[in-house]
Image: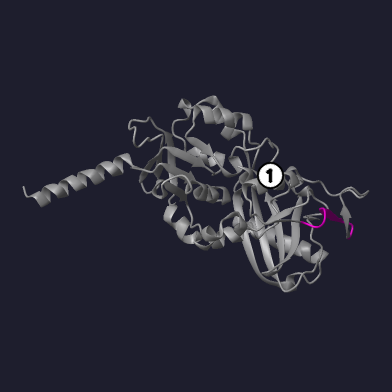
Amino acid sequence: MSFGLLKHFKDRKKTSEEESSGSFVKNIILGSDLGAILKVFALRKTENLDSIKIISNRVLNKKTLVENYNLGVCLLRSENAVTEIYKNHFNAKILPQKGEPIFYKDGKFHEFNSRAKPMQILNEESFFLSKGFRVDISSLFSPEDWENFDSIISSHLDIRILESVEKSEVKDLVEKSEWSLTFKDFKKMNCENLYVGISPVKFLSYLRNKDELTSDFIDFFTSIQVQSALSISWKLKKLPYEEDKTLFLPQSMTHEWGHFIVEFEENSEGAWAHGLFIVHEDEPQTEDLGSKIKLMKRVIERVFPQFENQIESEFIRFDDEMFMSGVKDELLEKLSFDYPTLNPIGQLSPLKVMMPTEKFLSRILLS
């Protein structure tokens, strides 16, 4: 047998073994949100660049990050959190709204501490009762990282659809395969450190050996509440309302359907209207979401006549895991002891300071 043919068979055998056992990457990040992206940049400071992979089912780039976080109503609502965030992100640009939230009823706006009573505030809406803080997303990165954002993320991004996750037994002291991941295309990956920023419900659905995991592990992920929401931003010719505050507009005056959360903003890009509503259905239909968007426009139009005539363009974002809450920090401590290579991140992450009531964007930026 010739040397070339022998090498060919050896290479095929090696490739076959790699496909069956899976490739090894030291650090794998599951997620597509800001928390997952910030983790990539944090790991780049301490790890070899080829040891970091972020797994997402969609493209991640600067444009989508800006659209998802610079557009939309304020998702940061804690003055105490802002003070602490500056300790982590020294150059962050965070601007407070000028006014407190107000609600619309009987043809005019009212303050929440007035004699007028609003329509029922749903549990998920109570978060927006505090004054908002708007974050310039680019200020969370160094100028060099922001300039090269797309090429940096692209070098770590692996677009795949996850099939399963399994806690594996370490057999190699060099490539410590603590976690095994399988994808829809039958590819496999193993890693030492797994960073979880996806919905806990989804993560649990991927786990293949739950019965071998501790009760604290299961309790942590099952106790977290996940809430879907739809966010819309409209580019306007001019603002119909000049005050910088959060507006609660009832979806109906006869039914307890909740509110549309609305804000108007003027920035360097022009005039904007931002709206958000909580989605209560587990699997909302496209036509139902479309009807709700039309309703939101009609409600805003009733309060601010000629609003729709001012619209130049719109950006719509539906996220079935926009808000995650109920993180049990005491269980996070147990989790880090029992499974030191499993790292919840983003909205699920442990806090560096004792601020257990913080959630959503606050928790992402405080971790």
Q: In the rendered view, does 322 fall on the left or right side of 307?
A: left
Q: Position of residue 234 (x, y in %)?
A: 68, 66
Q: In the rendered view, does 326 fall on the left or right side of 218?
A: right
Seen in the picture, residue 72 relative to 346 is either above or below; the reply is: below
- Secondary structure type for disc 1: helix
One can see residue 6 in this view: yes
Residue that extends furthest to the left in the rendered view of this protein: 1
- Comparing 15 with 41, the one in front is 41
Q: Residue at x 65, y 51 (%)?
A: 229
The secondary structure that most of the magenta stretch takes on is loop
Q: Position of residue 281 (x, y in %)?
A: 64, 47
- Comparing 51 with 349, the one in front is 51
Q: In the rendered view, does 199 fall on the left or right side of 355?
A: left
Q: Residue at x 60, y 37 (%)?
A: 350
Badge 1 crowding class, 10 Å Cα cut-off, few under 14, some 14 to 19, many 20 or more, is: some
Residue 105 included in the magenta stretch of the image = yes
Q: Position of residue 48 (x, y in %)?
A: 41, 47
Residue that extends furthest to the right in the rendered view of this protein: 115
Seen in the picture, residue 169 relative to 74 is either above or below; the reply is: above
Residue type, mark 1 in image: Glu
Magenta part of the protein: which range?
Answer: 97-107
One can see residue 32 in this view: no
Q: Position of residue 74 (x, y in %)?
A: 71, 54
User: Pointer 1: what residue?
Assistant: 84
Q: Residue at x 52, y 27 (%)?
A: 337
